[in-house]
Every structure is written in C-alpha cells, then in structure tokens.
Amino acid sequence: MTPAQNTQLDDANRMIAQQCAKIEQLKSELSSSLSSALTERATIEQMSADMIKLQSQVAWLSRQLFGRKSEKYALPAESSLFADLPQTTAPGTAPGSAPGTVPAPAPAPTQTITYEREVVTPSERGKRLPIPADLPRVERVHDLPASEKAGMKKIGQEISEKIEYEPGKVYVIRDVQIKYARIDECLDGSLPNVLLATKPDEGLPKCIAGPSLLAHIAVSKFADSLPLHRLEGILRRSNVDLNRSSMCRPRKLDARSR
C-alpha cells in the first residue's frame, strides 16, 4: 500500500473509534435516563397510591363528621378500601369467574311469626296518662271574696292538677353537745367530773359531707353518670363550696377500709 492509502486507512480507523466511543457514551446516557425514568415512574405510582389512600381517609372523616349517624354503611360503587391488596382467586371460585368473586351463599331458612297487640283507637291516641296518686299534693283553694259570694250558695268545685318540681335543698345539721360538770357536793373522785353528751356516729370521720349528701353524690356519679365537676357546679349554685377532691376523699377512705 502507498503511504497515502495508509494515511487514509488510519484516518478511517480513527473515525470509527471515535464513532464507537460516541455510541458507548450514548448507550451510557440512555441507560442512565432509563433508570431515572423507572425511578420516577415508581415514585409516581407510590404518590398515586398515597393519594388514593388519603382520599379514602378524607371520605371516611367526612362521613364521620357530616354524614348520617348510623352504624350501617354501604360501600360506594368504586371502592378503593382494598386497592393495595393483591387480587387473588378465592378458594372455591368457579372456573371462568372474575378473580376475587365469592359464590353466593344459600338462602337462610325463614319462619313466620305472628303476635297480637292492643288496638288503639284514634280518640285514645295521645291521651294523657293520669298523675300517680301516691305523689304528695299541695292543695290551694281559690274562693270568691265575701262581697262577691253574698247571697250565693256553693254548688260544686272544679279541680285541676299540674306537676311541679322543687330542686334539691341543701341544709346544715348543727350538732350541739351539751357539756356538764359535777357540782362540788358530788365530787367524790369515783365518777368523772365532766361529761359530754354523745352524738350519733354518722357518715365518715372528719368529712364535711353528711350521709345524705354522700348518698346523693354516689347516686349522681355512678347511677346517673354525672361528672364530679358538674356536681361541684350544682352545689356551688346552692352556695356550697365542695370541691372534687373532697368528693373523692370518701371513696378513697372506703377503698382503704376494705
């Protein structure tokens, strides 16, 4: 080969090497771009799943706050509650049926029940029940003045009743114990010189609340589910300052005595 041909051959080989290097560089850039695209795709899919989950949570919270207060809940047509679960074929699924479908259960046996009830006529519907006879009555007699009923005689009376309510009364029992001392003529040393009348042992020692108030607190707390801070406010309206710690103290003493 002539020197000119050798030069041309070397230039061609050099160009081929440069093109091969460019091809390898393009392959590396393509691989990097493909890896970035796959990473971004996985990120987008994760964000979509998170968005669907958040939408389901928002829908649930909206139903709890603004929806109908009922324990019965019907799933929407396109429910996404189980979007994250893999779709598998349930055991016993018929061949050719959709994945995840369950055969319909057999209808449960039924029975017919009959009952009798009292027939309420339209005139009796909404009739007011009589006031119990064992409730105490306070009778108030309303009569005409003597000037208006002069020359008239009583022919009857009209009676009407209504139920009244008197709030609970708070009162104080003041125990006064009389103290006696023996006179000089009876001081022989065989008997104590000073005697103090005894008072009945009621309630808990060193407790400002009497038995009836303690019973009222216990019934209101455990039977009527009334919190102690509300009991404190109710007693404060009657000008009684009995804090919650004092209300809890009898229960603590009772628990220690057991």
Image (cartoon, grey):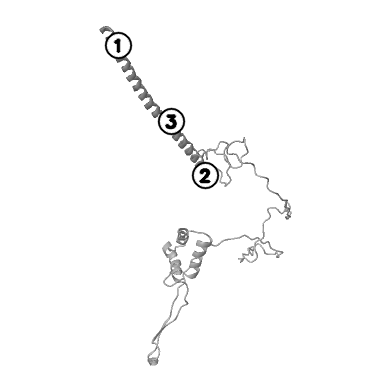
Q: Is residue 6 visible?
A: yes
Query: Circle 3 sits on which residue?
Result: 41
Return the x and y of residue 29 as percentages of the image width and height: 36, 24
Q: Amino acid at mark 3?
A: Arg
Where is the N terminus found, in terms of image quarters? top left
Specify which label sits upstream in the sequence, 2 or 3: 3
Q: Is residue 46 above or below residue 18?
A: below
Question: In 3D space, how far apart are the residues under numbered discs 1 and 3 (Cα atoms)?
Answer: 47 Å
Can you name the residue that lies furthest to the front here? 1
Specify which label sits upstream in the sequence, 1 or 2: 1
Q: Nearer the viewer, residue 40 or 205?
A: 40
> Disc 2 vs disc 3: which is toward the camera?
3
Q: Is residue 135 above or below residue 39?
A: below
- Is the residue under label 3 in contact with that under label 1 (CB below 8 Å)? no
Query: Circle 1 sits on which residue?
Result: 9
Q: Which secondary structure lies at badge 3?
A: helix
Specify which label sits upstream in the sequence, 1 or 3: 1
| Residue plotted at (42% across, 30% down) | 38
Question: In 3D space, how far apart are the residues under numbered discs 2 and 3 (Cα atoms)?
Answer: 35 Å
- Is the residue under label 2 in contact with that under label 1 (CB below 8 Å)? no
Q: Amino acid at mark 2?
A: Gln
Q: Amino acid at mark 1?
A: Leu
Q: Nearer the viewer, residue 160 or 101?
A: 101
